[in-house]
Amino acid sequence: MNAPPAADTDGLPQPRRIYAVGALMAAIVLAVLDGAIANVALPTIASVLQVSPADAIWVVSGYQLALVMALLPCAALGESLGYRVVFVAGVVLFTAASALCTFAPSLPWLVAARFLQGLGSAPIMALMAALLRFTYPHRLLGSALGWNALVVALASAAGPAIGAAILSVASWPWLFAVNIPVGIVVLLASRALPETKGTGRSLDFVSVALNAAVFGPLVIGVDLITSRPGLAALLIVVAAISLVVLIRREMPREAPLIPLDLLRGGPFRISVIASVCCFTAQMVSYVALPFYLQHGLGQNAFMTGLYMTPWPLAVAVAAPLSARMSNRVSTAWLCAVGGACLSVGLLLVSIWPLQGHLMALIPFTVLCGLGFGFFQTPNNRNMLLSAPRERAGAAGGMQGTARLVGQTSGAVIMGLLFTVAAAETAPRIGLAIGAALALAGGLVSLLRVGR
């Protein structure tokens, strides 16, 4: 998978490539920052709109729900109509929904606008990798994915600080208003994006509805699993039945909505499984660490944020470095080493006696970030290049779906742990589980050796 093609004439010429990359990176920053800064604003929004914290969480949940339901359909639509057309439509919808969020007079209005924002984010996230594949020559694709991971990591790290800075000088609607001028700039620069001819395949709306019936009840059911287990179980059963019906319907198709054709290929399937494992480990850790730091180690919210910052910063360092190495070193071994480093880092955080020795946490979280960075970029590269160019949209959609499935699974694991274990011990158990999952992701990646 690391060998370049015989001819290296694909990709956009300069300077058009620079403008195209600028549009893509700005769009992904919009999508990532919007999620991060909205989390910071939840207490303020709950207070101003006079709603409970539990109700305010739907400002985040509505966005995530729309995103996970729309990823695969948007990938299929991109293949049908052309990647640029659907990507631009997503940016338009995201920008317009940001304006609706800005002027939201009530929580239902805001949640509905956030749902539309999620629908707008879905084409951006689903088609980002496909557009990068057509923007860069094959020999530079690994570096492109590395820079993409760097931008995402920096945006994730900066999101809470940017949100706090805006709230310190302005009211919460400005968190969404700042998206509007950036969205307009992205739309202007998007004219430089590569023009890809769509296949013209019609979208099967029955399959789209079944896809929504899989992910919608699943996400809501997972959210309710600790508070209303009976209803949660019913929703998860509905999701499972819908998934079986969807797979049976899509199985005979040449280009199914769920990319079953790609999942039949060993390298692609292995990359998806490894991705789910490592993103589950990441989310378990992101939920467990704040509770461990605040409840177990007595740190306040500000210090908790500082101690967690080395992780995304280390990802930002490792991602472009692993991208360069993936042109010369087997991606299977890079992912295995990355998964092992993430596993060791999480295990050390879990078992090390940090009480009174908190500075030891910094090298542990740096090791976690380096491991995740060394895993993520080569794994995404392999997933994308395992698919034919005409199925790059489906590969990108599956890439995003694997990430969201892993993150949702991580949140579920921690939710269950908090119901069966004490608040002081559940985070450390979760970190140990995350270490096992990260190691599993690295070992699964080794199945690609020789393929």
Image: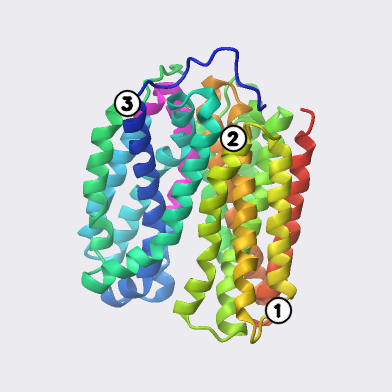
Q: Position of residue 42 (x, y in %)?
A: 37, 70
Q: Earlier in the sequence, mark 1 or mark 2?
A: 2
Q: Amino acid at mark 1?
A: Ala
Instruction: Indicate left or right for 331 with 311 as reference.
Output: right
Identify the residue at image location x=42%, y=67%: 57
Asked if residue 72 can be seen in this view, the reply is no
Q: Secondary structure at mark 3?
A: loop
Q: Any magenta on residue 81?
A: yes
Identify the residue at image location x=62%, y=38%: 325
Q: Which residues are magenta?
A: 63-85
Q: Amino acid at mark 3?
A: Pro
Q: Earlier in the sequence, mark 3 or mark 1?
A: 3
The residue that disc 1 covers is 421
Label placed on residue 230? none
The residue that disc 2 covers is 381
Q: CA distance from mark 3 to mark 2?
A: 24 Å
Q: CA distance from mark 1 to mark 2?
A: 39 Å
Number of residues whose C-alpha sits closer than 10 Å to that of mark 2, classed few (under 14), some (14–19) or many (20 or more): many
Identify the residue at image location x=78%, y=33%: 449
Q: Nearer the viewer, residue 97 or 244?
A: 97
Label placed on residue 15? 3
